[in-house]
Amino acid sequence: MPIMSSLRRSSKTWVVKGLLFLLGMTFVVWGVGGYLDQKANEPVVRVNEFAVSQQEFARLYDADFDRLRQMTNGQIDKKMAEALGLKQQVLSNLINRYLLLSVTRQLGMSVPLSYLQQRISGEVIFHSKGRFDPERYQQVLRQSHLTAQEYESGLTSDLAVDQLRRLANVVVATPQLLLENNYLMEQEQRRADRISLDPTALLAAIQVNDEQLEQFRSSHSTQFMTPVRFKVRYVLLDAASMRQGVSVSDAEMEEYYTEHEDSYRRRESRHVRHILARSEEKLKQIQSRLAAGESFESVAKTASEDTTAAQGGDLGWLSTGVMVPEFDQAAFALPKGEVSQPVKSSYGYHLIRIDDIRPAETTPLAQVREEIRQTLLEQKAQEAVYNHSIKLEDRLAGGGDLASIAHDFQLKEQSSDWLSDQQGQEEAAAVEQSPKFLEMARTTAVGQMSPLFELPNNRFVALQVVERQEARLPELAEIRDRVTSSFKMDAAQRQARTLLEEAVKALQQNQPWQQVVTMHPAFQADQTPLLRDGSHPDGTGDVTMNPEMMRLLFKLTLEKPLHPTPINDGTRLVLLRLATIQKADVAAMTEPQRRELSQRLAITQGEEQSAAWLQTWRKQAKIEFNSQLLEHL
């Protein structure tokens, strides 16, 4: 697809990133990372007529890895991501996407042109003063190194895939027996008897001496061990550090403008309305109404069989190549204000009217000079980063101190405070919080220079460790409060479990519930009727049990109503007993309940049906993996 290759060419522009993030498109354009090798043109996998490139795989992998790191506050590294199966997940998602795209082509699925136009005009990034602006549209695409045809082709493919997904999820009807069985299961009421004990209620009574604290500190040494800490000096080579050393001449801007003149040329556009009739009979009725003097807009609203009917047939501003050829040819031959003769297409019969015309024009250099200057400055800065990184790497290999290196390369020598790769350091500079930066600092000896290493976004760093503190177990006097607090909480949790285990034994020995509740003053008892989702049968109140406890409650039977061990419920330990079961009656199901349950079941059935279709399509597809290449990605 042209749009994919264009995106690959422009993957480093912020406009592309912002554009595609806002549009929610499925192809991703973040940094390539360190995956590409001398076999860069070999695809990672082939799916029917499509080939998935290394670059595309790398972009998706890096984007998913970044999201994973954000979700875990930076605690996940590449090795952990591999262990979690991230590579396989990315590959599976790519295969599924191109498989669905292949199926849309096999089925001859198409996207209504009016819907495509509606989607484009609805994107806020293309708006100016609260409405779609063709000039803004062209500017964003131009900055993204995309033509309108490339962008619209890619969006059409994505919309077709979405359409196929929705169709695969359509469920004709939910079986009545399934509906009733789910109602009976969901509406079954269970009353839970619980005794809860918060270990913190036991803390005040726990006594501790130094001998116990010392023993606890030693036996839990990993809990109290200080991490390895280090201070470093470093130089950062990035585009910002190179910007002052680059400049752009008028001649270079003029040359760029000339080479990219097509990007600054706006094609003729026309504000188009149309009325669609699916049959000749309907067409004749529409023509009669127009001949009788009814306005084009009112006839479109009441008679057009297109999704634009509500807008009076308004398709907005169109350029050539957006609509099907028959429509396109007629629309761009019409004078302003005239209604066309019937135009036949695969959609039916169109009557077209042109409301306004914007002639083709070229944006002058003067209007885009600053835009071009910034583009060239960024390109030169990035090139300078690459060139300087090679020289800097050679210089580091030859030795030298950090200060002289910083001076010779006109880089700022920077110093960190204490750093550690085992704890958050919000006050540290962003580069100092990078996992790669911390790993290099931790593995470099004091006084030694690290090799030059690369960080995301084309940044390079060389560092020197100036001070280091090894991991150690502090003396009790240094961490007495921490050890005391941990000792008491550990003791309280063990005591709480013992007390509830004794309560379980008492109930197993047929002691009355009310008597067991009074076995300890910190016991808190409650009796609550619940549905399977944790809510009250009358619809009031919040969920009072966590999902795991609800699962355990609905596994209990009246023959064996007592859960044999205390359950950890976050801050509390809980003894759980099933008191009563009240079966539901299908006859009591209201119509709103029936509709809501039917909708939920349809969603579940649709997801299962879609997964089954996808599995079938995968079995029928021709999927070829480049196993050797995948091992090195």
Image (tube, rainbow, N blue to C red):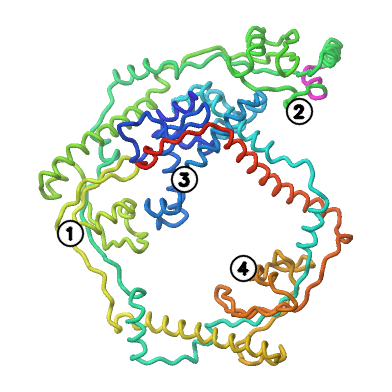
Circle 1 SS class: loop
- Between the C-alphas of marks 2 and 4, the distance is 50 Å
Which residue is tagged 4? 548
Which residue is tagged 3? 88
Quadrant for the C terminus, please.
Answer: top left
The amino acid type found where label 4 is placed reads: Glu
Which residue is tagged 1? 445
Closer to the observer: label 1 or label 4?
4
Q: Assess disc 1: are there few (<14), some (14-19) or many (≥20) residues with their C-alpha within 10 Å of its C-alpha.
A: some
- Between the C-alphas of marks 1 and 3, the distance is 37 Å
- Taking the view exactly as shown, the residue that stands out farthest to the right is 587
Residue at image position (38%, 23%) is 369
Q: Nearer the viewer, residue 325 or 581?
A: 581
Residue 72 seen by the camera: yes
Q: Report the disc number at residue 310.
A: 2
Q: Is the residue 562 above or below the residue 164 in the image?
A: below
The amino acid type found where label 2 is placed reads: Ala
The picture places residue 191, in percent across and down from the top left corner, at 75, 75
- Between the C-alphas of marks 2 and 1, the distance is 72 Å
Circle 2 SS class: helix
Residue at image position (37%, 37%) is 629
Span shown in magenta: 295-302
Q: Nearer the viewer, residue 552 or 531?
A: 552
- Between the C-alphas of marks 4 and 3, the distance is 29 Å
Circle 4 SS class: helix
